[in-house]
Structures are given as C-alpha cells and as structure tokens.
C-alpha cells in the first residue's frame, strides 16, 4: 500500500504542525478531538477519511505497529472542516477498543510521541460500516485515494 503526499493542506486551530497538542485534546484531559480544517482538495474529491496514529507507541502486533487514536470516514467531499469534538460521520474503532476519538496518552516518562492526523481525499463515496479499524479502512479506500496530507502534533506525559 503506497500513498504520496498531495497539495492538500490540513490544519488545526488547536495547534500547529510540530507543536504540542493541548491537554484538552488528550486522554488525560477532556479527550475531545481537535477542530480540523483543510484546503486544496484535489479535483474530483467525493469524500474524505481521517486517521490519527501514534507511530512512537511501543506496540507491534501482526499487521500493525504504533497506536491508532481515531478513524473517521464518510465525510462528504464538500466539507472542509470539522468542529472540535465532532460526532458526525462514520466512526471507526481505535486501539483503545472504542469507536471515535481517543486522545494521546503515552506512558509516563516515555518521552514525546508524535501524533499523525492523516487526511485522505477519495474519488468515491463509499458506504462503509461503522467500526472499521485503520487497516480495514485502508483496504477499502486505497484504490480511491487521490490526495492526502498530514498534521503532526506532539504530546508527552512526564
């Protein structure tokens, strides 16, 4: 499975790329997803999907690595922003075993972790069931991905 970054841009009003994710958006805080917005979606975009993944988590299991914090899909192609704590669209399952967003909560003293918020632009509207894992979602969307980019936040528990 290979993807390449596109001209599409992903941003948050809560933090800039490379900066700390505010406590409010973490598992030790209010645990609400940050507001996100994007621009320059490719022509022909019919829908979007979002993933939040921590590759710094010391977890490796068959077919996976790191820790998935959020899988959201079924976002219509005419949408270009999500409010904080979004409850709309189709929620997948995270590695906490829950549907929806589960904020950063690395082990204490483990150092800074990087949280990749990935935005995927798709050339199709897919009717996918709720509760897909990140890897299940990737298998469904890979042929339809026409653009992608990321926003990286950092969080550390001391």
Image: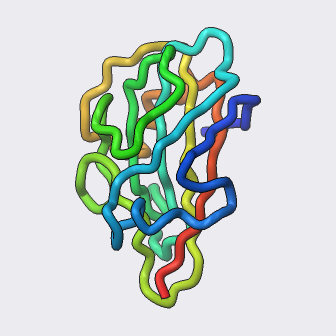
Residue at the limit of the structure toward the top, as seen here: 44
Task: Tell me residue 59's x, y (percent).
Answer: 45, 72
Task: Tell me residue 98's x, y (percent).
Answer: 23, 54
The answer to which image quadrant residue 136 occupies is top left
Task: Tell me residue 34's x, y (percent).
Answer: 45, 49
Residue nearer the viewer, 127 or 28: 28
Please say if 31 is above or below 72. below
Horizontally, residue 68 falls left or right of residue 111, namely left
Q: At x 68% / y 35%, what residue is drawn?
A: 9
Q: At x 48% / y 21%, what residue is drawn?
A: 79
The answer to which image quadrant residue 142 occupies is top right
**What is the count of numbered marks?**
0
Quadrant of image for the N terminus: top right
Q: At x 53% / y 71%, what residue is drawn?
A: 155
Q: At x 53% / y 63%, what residue is drawn?
A: 21
Please say if 85 is above or below 38. below
Please say if 72 is above or below 74. below
Task: Tell me residue 105's x, y (percent).
Answer: 40, 72
Horizontally, residue 79 falls left or right of residue 40, namely left
């Amino acid at each position: 499975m290979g993807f390449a970054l596109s001209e599409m841009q992903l941003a948050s009003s809560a933090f800039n790329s490379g900066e700390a994710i505010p406590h409010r958006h973490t598992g030790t805080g209010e645990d609400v997803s940050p507001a996100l917005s994007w621009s320059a979606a490719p022509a022909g975009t019919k829908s979007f999907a979002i993933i939040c993944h921590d590759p710094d988590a010391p977890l490796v299991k068959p077919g996976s690595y790191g820790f998935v914090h959020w899988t959201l899909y079924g976002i219509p192609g005419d949408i270009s922003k999500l409010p904080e704590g979004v409850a709309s669209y189709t929620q997948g399952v995270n590695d906490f075993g829950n549907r929806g967003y589960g904020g950063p909560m690395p082990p204490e003293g483990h150092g800074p972790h990087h949280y990749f918020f990935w935005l995927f632009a798709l050339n199709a509207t897919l009717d996918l069931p709720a509760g897909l894992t990140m890897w299940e979602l990737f298998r469904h969307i890979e042929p339809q991905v026409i653009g992608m980019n990321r926003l990286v936040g950092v969080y550390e528990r001391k």
